Amino acid sequence: MKDMAQTERQIFILLLLSENKRGYTINDIHDSLEKWDVIVDKKTIGRDIDSLSGICFITEEARNGKTYYTADKFRLRDITFTSPELISLSFLLELLKPYQYMTMGKTAQELIHKLLDNTTNLNREFIKHFSGLVTINTNDYISDEVNPEIEDRLQSAIRNKTKVRVIYHSFGGDEDTIRIIHPYELMINDGALSVVGYCELRNDIRDFRVSRIKAITPLEETFLIPSDYFLKKARSKFIHLSGNVVEQIIISFDGPTTKYIQEYESDLADEIVVTETGINFIRDTAVTDELVRWIMQYGSGAKVLNPPHLRDRIRQELMKSLEQYS
């Protein structure tokens, strides 16, 4: 059960009441809170609504023997921004460009423009002048074509903790499979939108690229996210890797590569040991194709010390590459 403070709970209720014109009953609000593992009695929700009525315009309407509550949408008018804030908004717009193909990215852009529409002409002119003066290297981003309906259904399933049945095209097997997944969260991996969740077919937590989901059917059955999922996930990933067998890998980096690893990739290691020629990068992780590609990108600047089978695999890959140029 989540520990939600009264203020957080009331903000949640206010946002919920402003979602649509149909309105929500106290039972509806209670069920929505329960889906987020927030357990609170209905009398408390009634008191929250009374409290919110004193500061917000909340209406109540009786229909079919039930009382429905609604709240006016929040309105923003004549917002004033400082120059650093306007520059930051320009930065956010530039940052969002690669994600225009996602519903979330498109909506985020629209939200920023909505903020700008409610500010002064001077601020809008400032943004127009500053546009293009901030450039972000987007070479790592992938412009996947994501079906907006699939993305919306995944978001709904994540919010409501309901299972979904998907037809998924596997990249490795180059085939379509039917999966029932418990979607925990949406994540951007290597520039592509993915959904992370438990896969009943594989009996494991997996990542699914959303663009490879060919069809999705929401199911009524609900699920619970393991209590330690968010604590473990940071350490169960190495770049964008997954696998069942975890081993200790030791990679020796030397020359200019040493400085690069220390500056940009050191947080990926469990431990970094300084040596006479460079550093040893130590990490417990699964040996996967992506790990092999990650190591090989450093060429002669990287040498696998452990495990032996990973060293042999790197050697084989290098020999195959050499044959291409024989």
Image: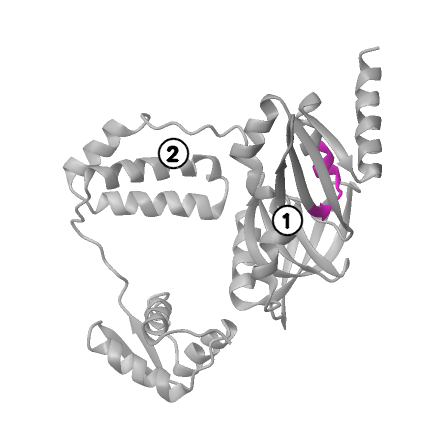
The residue labelled by disc 2 is 94
Question: Mark 2: few, some, or many residues within 10 Å (few <14, many ≥20)?
Answer: some
State which mark lies toward you, 1 or 2: 1
Q: Of the residues shown, which amino acid type is indicated by label 2?
A: Glu
Q: State left or right for residue 137 relative to residue 8.
A: right
Q: Of the residues shown, which amino acid type is indicated by label 1?
A: Lys
Tag 2's secondary structure?
A: helix
Residue 299, horizontal then vertical, whole percent? 69, 23
Q: Using the image, tell me which numbered label, if any, was put on residue 112.
A: none
Residue 99, horizontal then vertical, whole percent? 48, 39
Question: Mark 1: few, some, or many residues within 10 Å (few <14, many ≥20)?
Answer: some
Tag 1's secondary structure?
A: loop
Q: Residue at x 38, y 27 (%)?
A: 135
Q: Is residue 274 visible?
A: yes
Q: State left or right for residue 13 relative to residue 304.
A: left
- In the displayed structure, would residue 309 be above or below residue 5? above
Q: Residue furthest top?
A: 326
Q: Residue at x 57, y 36 (%)?
A: 265
Q: Earlier in the sequence, mark 1 or mark 2?
A: 2
Q: Using the image, tell me which numbered label, if any, was put on residue 237.
A: 1
Q: Residue at x 62, y 53 (%)?
A: 235
- In the displayed structure, would residue 201 be above or below residue 275? below
Specify the quadrant of the image occupied by residue 189.
top right
Residue toward you, 205 or 256? 256
Start and end of the magenta stretch?
A: 284-293
Residue toward you, 272 or 118? 272
- In the displayed structure, would residue 57 be above or below residue 75? below
Q: Residue at x 76, y 43 (%)?
A: 287
Within the magenta stretch, is there residue 68?
no
Residue 131, horizontal then vertical, whole percent? 30, 29
- In the displayed structure, would residue 143 be above or below residue 248? above
